[in-house]
């Protein structure tokens, strides 16, 4: 017989439904809290990139633990090729990318870029805070870190490094300009605060990336004494590798730091040997003999020799985005290149598309300005000036450079148009471009000669502005500030604006861009600057090219990040180790 529902049954059912509803709502609230927690984690991860916009108050540092025991074996060496020998390894006075590359393994900053995400993460600081005004940056330094000579790292090292860099006698005008409106104060043995007088979108990044040297090894050194310090030939850092020795014109040797403080980034390769071989043909022969483990080949080597079995049987072939551009710079202090029309005529005389196709095998692109070609700062609506000798001739005529005596060489006010192009020794690309340009200029009545110097002498001539034209390349930053290269204040001895470009409109745009925190608005200013430089041609902008890399296959755990590989990931199985 069916049961008849009583009022008690209905009350029980109602209570049950209420309870079920409460449980359901609680679960939804839990889901929301979980989503908010995930959002918070995401924000925490991204805060380092957002901090450069100002207004954030705190960001935690990374931990120093590993998720699981690291079972990768240690041992073996990595022999890395460098095309030139740096003049010094002092990070404050060094002026080339080679010193910076070696120092990556010896020295550390307050924060460093993650190779995968490209965002800044704490390194020698544990945490940092940015004031609401966006003008103060407080760094809480990591305790327990020692220099390679076992002296503790403290705030005194940060203060000394900043002060010696800001000393006008220190040979570092190329970096000092980024800190012109910044001061620093010691708040404690492990806390420092940087203060900026003006809002500058890169101020936090620059403070986080300050080059730090050990105060106790310099003490009262400043100016000339700091510039010439022997420390630059035998640096002491806090990083994963220790300096061993520098054999002049041959190599720099580093060894693994067994007491490195950062457990998650402990290296596994015992030694890094940076081998200097300026001749690219000789370097490729060393690769084939497996005397070099890590090599950046030329485009021709990449397309020809790097495809041979003697290379492919033993080396990985990898290609990455290249954050740099090649150029020919025209010194506007000389009588030859003061006139924009002459500089433009020089650019019309360079068959860039042809060189890209036949000399660089279409690996890269011709560029029209100084920003990374794949960035929003680069104005893609600007077409590079074409190769056109007839236009070059007309421009030279308009500028008053004509052959008045019939000797085949243009002249003006009694001065023949004969100049030298300075190029670094051993770089076949620059030499080949120079030889081609020499022939093209001869067709339009201009005589050019080639001047090749070893790297140290080459850099000195740039610093002293002792050249008429120069061909080289610039490495770019992911967060580019054109002040160093293009502001008129950066001309003069040791300045990076060594072609003496000066434009009131360009200066104004550069200065405005420094205080613009909105990236989209800042890029509008950069594109306007790009157009000015395109019209004025202080450089003939040549190419953006990818980074090409050959790496011996015995190295394991090689990860391909957006801008390259990271040796700290690598290891070699014991049975494959070559060096003991």
Image: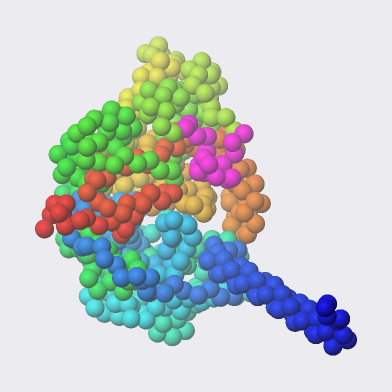
Magenta run includes residue 179: no
Q: Is residue 246 at least partly visible in the picture?
A: no
Image position of 161 with respect to 346: above or below: below
Work out which residue is located at the far top of the displayed protein and give it. Answer: 406
Which image quadrant is residue 273 in? bottom left
Instruction: Indicate whether 114 appears above or below 279.
Output: below
Q: Which residues are magenta?
A: 365-381
Q: Is residue 379 magenta?
A: yes
Vertical side of 253 occupied by 215: above or below: below
Marks counted in the figure total 0
Give the image location of residue 89, x and y in percent.
Answer: 28, 59
Q: Position of residue 222 (x, y in %)?
A: 32, 70
Q: How is the image coloured?
A: rainbow
Q: Position of residue 219 (x, y in %)?
A: 29, 77
Name the residue at the bottom extreme. Answer: 8
Residue drawn at point x = 27 percent, y = 53 percent:
556
Answer with the quarter of the image where residue 439 lies: top left
- Report whether residue 556 is seen: yes
Q: Quadrant of the C terminus?
A: bottom left
Q: Which residue is drawn at the image coordinates 43% and 43% (left, top)? A: 321
Q: Nearer the viewer, residue 51 or 459?
A: 51
At horizontal 72% and vertical 75% (from top left) the residue drawn is: 24
The overriding secondary structure of the stretch rendered in magenta is loop
Picture quarter with the N terminus: bottom right
Q: Is residue 494 left or right of residue 341?
A: left
Q: Residue placed farthest to the right in the image?
A: 7
């Amino acid at each position: 017989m069916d049961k008849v529902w009583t009022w008690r049954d209905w009350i029980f059912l109602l209570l049950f439904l209420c309870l079920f509803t409460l449980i359901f709502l609680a679960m939804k609230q839990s889901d929301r809290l979980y989503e908010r927690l995930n959002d918070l984690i995401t924000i925490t991860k991204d805060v380092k990139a957002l901090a450069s916009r100002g207004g954030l108050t705190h960001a935690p540092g990374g931990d120093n633990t590993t998720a699981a025991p690291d079972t990768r074996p240690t041992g073996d060496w990595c022999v890395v090729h460098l095309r030139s020998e740096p003049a010094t390894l002092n990070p404050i006075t060094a002026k080339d990318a080679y010193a910076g590359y070696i120092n990556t393994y010896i020295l550390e900053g307050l924060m460093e870029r993650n190779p995968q995400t490209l965002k800044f993460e704490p390194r020698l600081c544990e945490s940092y805070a940015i004031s609401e005004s966006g003008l103060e940056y407080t760094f809480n330094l990591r305790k327990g870190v020692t220099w390679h000579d076992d002296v503790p790292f403290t705030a005194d090292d940060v203060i000394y490094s900043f002060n010696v860099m800001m000393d006008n006698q220190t040979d570092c005008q190329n970096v000092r300009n980024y800190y012109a409106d910044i001061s620093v104060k010691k708040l404690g043995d492990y806390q420092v605060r940087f203060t900026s007088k003006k809002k500058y979108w890169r101020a936090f990044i620059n403070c986080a990336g300050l080059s730090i040297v050990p105060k106790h090894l310099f003490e009262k050194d400043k100016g000339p004494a700091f510039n010439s310090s022997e420390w630059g030939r035998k640096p002491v850092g806090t990083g994963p590798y220790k300096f061993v020795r520098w054999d002049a014109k041959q190599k720099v040797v580093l060894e693994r730091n067994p007491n490195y403080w950062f457990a998650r980034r402990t290296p596994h390769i015992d030694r890094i040997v940076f081998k200097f071989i300026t001749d690219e043909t000789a370097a490729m022969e060393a690769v084939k003999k497996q005397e070099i483990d890590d090599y950046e080949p030329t485009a021709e080597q990449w397309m020809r020799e790097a495809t041979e079995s003697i290379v492919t049987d033993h080396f990985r072939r990898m290609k990455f985005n290249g954050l740099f551009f090649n150029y020919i710079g025209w010194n506007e202090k000389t009588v030859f290149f003061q006139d924009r029309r002459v500089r433009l005529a020089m650019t019309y005389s360079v068959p860039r598309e042809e060189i890209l196709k036949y000399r660089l095998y279409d690996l890269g692109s011709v560029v029209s300005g100084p920003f990374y070609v794949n960035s929003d700062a680069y104005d893609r609506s600007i077409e590079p000036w074409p190769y056109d000798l007839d236009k070059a001739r007309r421009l030279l005529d308009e500028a008053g450079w004509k052959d008045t005596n019939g000797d085949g060489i243009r002249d003006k006010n009694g001065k023949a148009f004969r100049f030298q192009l300075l190029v670094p020794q051993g770089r076949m690309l620059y030499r080949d471009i120079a030889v081609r340009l020499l022939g093209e200029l001869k067709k339009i009545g201009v005589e050019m000669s080639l001047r090749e110097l070893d790297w140290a002498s080459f850099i000195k001539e740039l610093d002293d502005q002792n050249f008429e034209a120069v061909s080289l390349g610039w490495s770019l930053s992911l967060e580019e500030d054109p002040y160093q290269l293009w502001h008129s204040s950066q001309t003069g001895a040791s300045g990076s604006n060594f072609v003496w470009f000066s434009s009131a409109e360009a200066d104004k745009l550069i200065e405005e861009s420094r205080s613009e925190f909105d990236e989209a608005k800042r890029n509008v200013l950069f594109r306007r600057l790009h157009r000015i430089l395109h019209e004025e041609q202080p450089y003939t902008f040549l190419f953006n090219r990818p980074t090409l890399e050959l790496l011996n296959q015995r190295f394991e755990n090689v990860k391909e990040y957006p801008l390259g590989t990271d040796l700290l990931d690598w290891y070699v199985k014991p049975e494959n180790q070559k060096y003991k």
